Amino acid sequence: MNKSGIWIALLCFLLCAGCSQPPGGADGYKVAFVPSKTGEYGIFSINSDTTGSKILVADRMAQVRFASWSPDGKKIAFYTKRSQDTSILEKYRMINEYLLYVMDATGENQKRLLDFPVIDFGWAPDSRRLFFISAHESPDRNSPEVLTGTNRPLAYVYVLDTQSGAVKRLPGSGRNCSASWSPDGARLAVGFGIGEYCGIYLISSDGRQSERLTDGATIDFRPAWSPDGKAIAYIGYKKIDGDVGNSGVFVIASDGTGKKCVDYRPASYVLWSLDGSMLLLQSANTARLIDPNGQKQVLLQAAAGLRSISNAVFTPDGKRVMFCSNDYGDWKIYSIGLDGKKRRTITIKTNASNFCLSPLLTRREEHL
């Protein structure tokens, strides 16, 4: 056995030591993560109660993001780079774009989905389609500014049918694209534009219908659709000549009415809780919970007794928030209650700063 095989076997042994819970664990969902220590690599899955472990991908370059697990729990989309991808990577040399693969949640049937790299992606509620953002058709993708990372390339939002392979490019483009599926999968809230002319648009999944949602008063990014489909949260930044108060996290009805700022501090992204009663705001090294009216705030890093928190997401049962922190030197994954209490360490025997969560799983579903 080579050194790579020894390391993977050892990590699996350490993670599985003392495992006795049924598949899914006591909390009923799984965590897929990438180890963060030098020399450690691959994608592993572990139960959210820290029991059970399995190596899914042994690639050195493999990465997941928080939207990787499909809503039905059967698939995981991930980034990686393999020897057969060399010609693609030589053709498309943009920084911060990656090749998108998909596999069964068991790690089987791994395949590359596209012949070009992507910037971001997200599963549709039907677990068949994905939106992805890519600059592979950008007219400036080979410019020196883009290749050196000085400028972002012009990018587009696409919808991919993972079964048929059909790809549809949605109208619009920008250098700061982002998207979020509506709960019924019929539309996407898309943020795009250039410079100060970035707004949120609602676009049908076939690209035939498009309308602007936001009013252009701010530079708008990172929309997030509420679970009931009635509202959209997003990040807004003030324009050069705009009011300093025109920045923060906003919530607006999906018909464009009732816009309100719920928090004036900047954020990197915003997520809705499972029942729509809370918003999770991730900023640089901080995360906080707030209700959609801008009240009942919980500062998670203070409540958890940590200085920094990153990659925060709601757990699939809606009862906790999972996040990463390196306060004690090594990156670990933690979870904490919505009241900021009962912090729990998920990656006890290894380190990880990159993870995604399955939906809630029953024993029956996991044996299908």
Image (cartoon, rainbow, N blue to C red):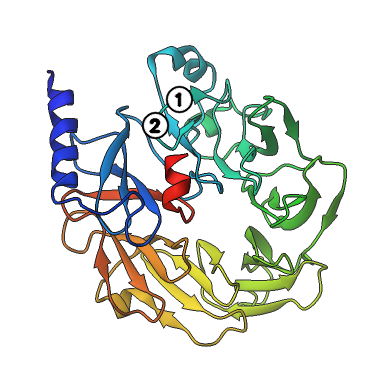
Name, please, the residue furthest toward the right. 208
> Identity of the amino acid at label 2?
Gly
| Vertical placement of residue 21 versus 5, above or below | below
| Vertical placement of residue 366 versus 278, above or below | above
Name, please, the residue furthest toward the bottom. 296
Q: Which numbered disc covers residue 263?
A: none
Element type at mark 1: loop
Residue 13: x percent and y percent?
14, 39
Q: Measure the C-alpha gap from mark 2 to mark 1.
A: 7 Å
> Identity of the amino acid at label 1?
Gln
For residue 65, say whether it is visible. Answer: no
Q: How many marks?
A: 2
Tell me which corner region of the image, top left, top right, bottom left or bottom right, holds residue 215: bottom right
Are the residues at dot 2 and dot 1 in contact (C-beta closer than 8 Å)?
yes
The structure residue drawn at horizontal position 18% and vertical position 56%, both measured from the top left corner, is: 348
Report the side of 149 relative to 2 (left or right).
right
Pick the residue in front: 231 or 219: 231
Residue 179: x percent and y percent?
65, 50
The structure residue drawn at horizontal position 50% and vertical position 40%, both measured from the top left corner, is: 74
Residue 290: x percent and y percent?
51, 79
The structure residue drawn at horizontal position 12% and vertical position 27%, both measured from the top left corner, is: 6
Judging by the rendered image, the residue that carries numbered circle 2 is: 107
Label 2 environment density (alpha carbons within 10 Å; few <14, some 14–19, many ≥20): some
Report the side of 298 relative to 327 (left or right).
right
For residue 273, say whether it is visible. Answer: yes
Name, please, the residue furthest toward the front. 364
Tell me which corner region of the image, top left, top right, bottom left or bottom right, holds residue 337: bottom left
**In which quadrant is the N terminus drawn?**
top left
Q: Which numbered disc covers residue 110?
A: 1
